[in-house]
Image (cartoon, helix red, strand yellow):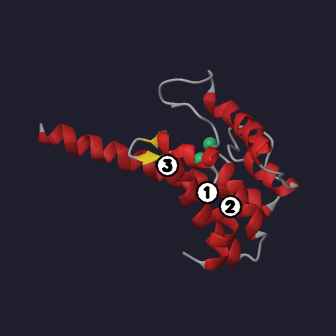
Amino acid sequence: MDDEFLAIATPLLEHPVVKALAQYNHHKAKTRLEHVKEVAWLSFLWGKRLSLDCRAIVRGALLHDLFFYDWMREGPRLHGFRHHNIALANARRLTELSPKEIDIIKRHMWPLTIIPPRYAESLVVCMVDTFCSVRDYLKGKKDEKCVSNRR
Ligand SMILES: [Fe+2]
Ligand SMILES: [Fe+2]
């Protein structure tokens, strides 16, 4: 991976609270840590291409799903509408956040949560997150189909 990406990401990735995301499945065959790393990396590449604030993108993306329950089986009702606030509260306990980083976490579920992203950086993370989530969902469905066809 790119040196700049690693320089921004490593302090957060070495934090035990962020490391704990590896204990949670996020999209069937992917842990939450794998998911946030993937979203951070792909968003970083878009951020570079569009000359955006890549530090905010990487940090916001790594923290956008900082919650600690298996949302497919437990956690608060209406998880999709609420977990951005849970992640933001957890992220604030972990590190000082810039306004862009706050917006990235808070708006990443747009348009499900009505208020749109305020910054281009937030929009990039939101779109990459949606792309990764849909792709993981479809891959999970395909894998399930393969397993049931083999039975
Ligand atoms: Fe999320
Ligand atoms: Fe996500």
Vertical order, 50 against 134 (above or below):
below
Q: Which mark is residue 14?
A: 1
Quarter of the rendering occupied by the C terminus: top left
Vertical order, 29 against 50 (above or below):
above
- Residue depth check, mark 3 versus mark 1: number of the one nearer the observer: 1
Residue 112 in picture, x, y percent from top left: 68, 38
Q: CA distance from mark 3 to mark 2?
A: 29 Å
Residue beneath the point at 80% across and 43% down: 92
Q: CA distance from mark 3 to mark 1?
A: 28 Å
Q: Earlier in the sequence, mark 3 or mark 2?
A: 2
Vertical order, 7 against 114 (above or below):
below
Q: Earlier in the sequence, mark 3 or mark 1?
A: 1
Residue beneath the point at 64% across and 52% down: 15
Type of the residue with mark 3: Val
Q: CA distance from mark 2 to mark 1?
A: 5 Å
Residue at the extreme left of the image, as rendered = 151
Q: What residue is disc 3 on?
A: 134
Residue beneath the point at 79% across and 69% down: 53
In depth, the one of 73 and 115 nearer the eye is: 73
Quarter of the rendering occupied by the N terminus: bottom right
Judged from the image, the secondary structure of the residue bearing numbered disc 3 is helix
Q: What residue is disc 2 on?
A: 11
Residues at circles 2 and 1 in contact by the CB criterion of under 8 Å: yes
